[in-house]
Image (cartoon, coloured by chain):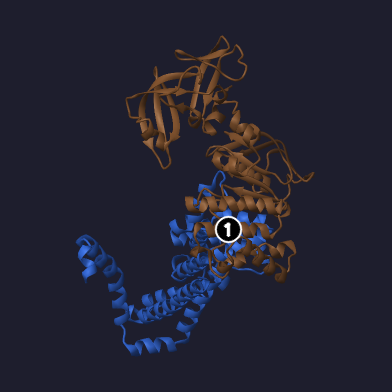
Chain colours: A brown, B blue
Amino acid sequence: MITIENLNINLPNFSLDNINLQIDEGDFFTLLGPTGSGKSVLLETIAGLIPVSSGSIKINQNDVTRTVPEKRGLSIVYQDYALFPHLSVKDNITFGARYKNIGPVKADKKALELAEMLNISHLLDRTPRNLSGGEKQRASIARALLVDPAVLLLDEPLSALDPSFRQEVQDLLKSIHRETGITFVMVTHDFDEALYLATNGAIIQNGKLIRKGLIRDIFNTPGSEFVANFVGMTNIYKCSPENGCVRLGGMLLQCEKQISNEKCHIAFRPEEIILGNELNEQESPNTFEAIIKAITIGGFHARVALDYAGIEINTLVPRKLILNEALETGAKIKVAIPPQSIHLF
Amino acid sequence: MKKFHNISASYIISGFLVLGFILLPLSQLIFGSSLKEITETIMDKDVREAIIRSMACSGLAAIIAFAIGTPFAFLLARNNFRGKEILNSIIDLPIMIPHPVIGIALLSIAGRNHWIGQRLLDFGIRLMGTSTGIVAVLLFVGLPFYINAARDGFESVPERLEKAARTLGASRSQTFLRVTFPLAWKYLLTGMIMCMARALSEFGAVVIVAYHPMVAPVLMYERFTAYGLAYSRPVAIWLIFISLILFAALRLLSRGLRGNEA
């Protein structure tokens, strides 16, 4: 569907270096990375809005590297909606019809269908300024879908939304993708969003593509300190292999995977660490005792920061565990890190 | 009056000084002539012609500024390139340099001794002592006001709107006409009003290029030097009055269109 080969972009203060990427037809693909990493630049380059310095972009086997945006068959949805403020919602949605040879009658019919699907039929005569964030984003998605794009590009479509609308639009994107079968390419810095919505993805760091593949694989086997951090593994340590285990401070941790003799990193997710005074080494390998440094209670979960011989370990546990185990700052608690939760790279 | 309680005395003094400085001489100008003098002045054919010429030449300068300045203002608003700040400074040059110098500079390239002047003469275009010369001078002094306003207008339109329009199938020019222009037009109109206002008040450069045919400021100067203050004042009153009506109408038109848009 989309094939990017040896792509280089040189902008005044930024560059994308040697990007190679394949996005399959009908895929929900995410471009992930922290702010300023270049993911939006790549998305706009695919759209034809940023000129390519070298390399090629093909869509359905056609080389579109030098093709103007209006001829690429893609449409884009921006984080800030980019609705035309001087036009009504309906005129926004039908904006592209005349350029895609969709007659006014057909465009109106299609706009109504899309508005119904996106639950904004009652807003068609309003101007964008009077809409909520969620409604604006729905109108923006309807506008992008009216022109029957081969690929829908989404530039952080959820990040400007209130949390109450975010889940709603997230579900909407998932159902539109399922129903239309259009290829979706979404930029996000939120790995949770990617995990929920996408099948495949790529991670970009400082203009370089450092990891690509199934989102679930990236999540489970990050492969580098940066990716581990990015996917939410807050516990990342340098350690050394020893007798088939890894040494972390004064403790030898068993791992599920084979360990090479080289120095390595280990990482584990805060939510996969088990806390409990009843834990024992026979039933739970990698059990040790640590001191509680801090407890931060959130909605349904609590973050518990532990200290084990000067090493800080962050955990995420159900809130009720704090009460059940009577956890408090300064107290000792038994900790178990399941071998299957330890990722090596 | 309650609103003024929280305003510091220094603001009020400052306001009085500014408004007084502007309004006192103008009110003296307006009330210094009798109704009879004012009526007789407008019956004078020379006065009417000079005011109409001033309006027409200034209006034409604003229209030309719109036609030639809009694409350049858009370029400045949408692109960052080396030397952009120098270009912006060049655009502001006509505001800074003494106005007689503008007249001399224009004449020096439009005369017979310069190849541009020779080419213009080949096409029958003469600047010295013609309405064409007046429009050229007024365009020169008014252009920075239009370009700056138009550039601000284009900068106020988020680039993402244009990008979204392009991916929806609109070409560059279609995007400009359907998205950028409708969102920036009020800045362009303000720029044209500013350009025309500036042109209308120009004297120093016009008097070098074309003493005749006379525009209103030159006529006022001539009446002042030949007959004194009492003869030049009614012409000034008419120029102020007509300008006020014209600019108020343009402002109202701009506001009315903005209201319809909302």
Label 1 is placed on what type of residue?
Answer: Arg
Q: Secondary structure at mark 1?
A: helix
Residue under the point 50% across and 17% down: A282
Residue A110's spot in the image, x, y percent?
69, 65
Against A9, is B65 above or below?
Answer: below
Count of numbered marks: 1
Left or right for A85, reference B3: right
Residue A254's spot in the image, x, y percent?
54, 17
Against B135, is A253 above or below?
Answer: above
Residue A154's spot in the image, x, y percent?
61, 49
Residue under the point 60% across and 36% down: A15
**Which of the pair A104/B88 is nearer the observer?**
A104
- In this rendering, does residue A97 appear at all? yes
Left or right for B169, reference B82: right
Find disc 1 in the rendering and name its residue.
A138
- In this rendering, does residue B118 appear at all? no
Against B180, is A157 above or below?
Answer: above
Residue under the point 42% across and 26% down: A276
Residue under the point 60% across and 28% down: A221
**Which of the pair A137/B3 is nearer the observer?**
A137
Residue B17's spot in the image, x, y percent?
25, 65
Quarter containing the N terminus of chain B: bottom left
Subunit that carries the residue with mark 1: A
Left or right for A63, reference A69: right
